[in-house]
Amino acid sequence: RLCIHDPARFRPVEATVKIISALLNLHDPGLFWESPGARPEFLDKLMGDASVREQLSGGVDPNRIIEGWQQGHAAFARSRADALLYAAS
């Protein structure tokens, strides 16, 4: 059970990556992704591609994965600003 006490600060995607990382530390990644009923392609779809699953299976620290997103987000925000017709509010 996961109780969210401060919804404004909760980051569900980051929490998902950290929870999966913790589970992979407890269980064999092959078993985790290849068990009957496992749907790794669903996680890939939610995350945009297989890179998050591959990094998690490879033992990459979840904070490092999240930091990579933040760098990409900053670059996107800069390029997006040039394309906006109206000022962002």
Image (spheres, grey):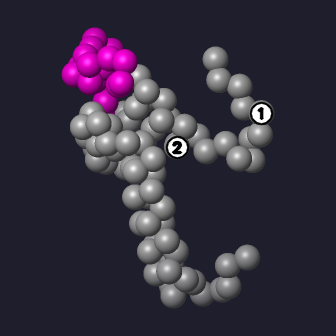
Please state which amino acid type lies under the numbered disc 1: His
The magenta stretch is: 24-41
Q: Picture coordinates of residue 70 (x, y %)?
A: 48, 61
Query: Which residue of the protein is positioned furthest toward the right in this rendering?
Result: 5
Above-or-below relation of 23 to 49:
above
Q: Secondary structure at mark 1?
A: loop
- What secondary structure is marked by label 2? helix
Decide which of 62, 38 is in the foreground and name it: 62
Disc 2: CA contacts within 10 A as few (<14), some (14-19) or many (>=20): few
Name the one closer to the observer, 79 or 68.
68
Residue 10 coordinates in the image, percent (x, y) = 67, 42
User: What is the number of the mark on residue 14?
Assistant: 2
How packed is label 1: few (under 14 Cα within 10 Å), some, or many (20 or more)? Answer: few
Residue 48, image x and y in percent? 37, 49
Query: Where residue 44 sits in the image (x, y, percent)?
Result: 34, 40
What is the distance, in whole Å, between disc 1 and disc 2 at their CAs? 16 Å
Q: Is residue 18 left or right of residue 85?
A: left
The residue drawn where x is 44% and y is 66% is 71
Residue appearing at x 37%, y 33% in the figure? 42
| Residue 38 visible to the viewer | no
Was residue 37 drawn as part of the magenta stretch in this picture?
yes
Q: Which amino acid type is shown beneath numbered disc 2?
A: Glu
Q: Quadrant of the C terminus?
A: bottom right
Q: Which residue is mark 1?
A: 5
Classify the position of the N terminus by image quarter: top right
Residue sitting at 54 percent across and 37 percent down? 15
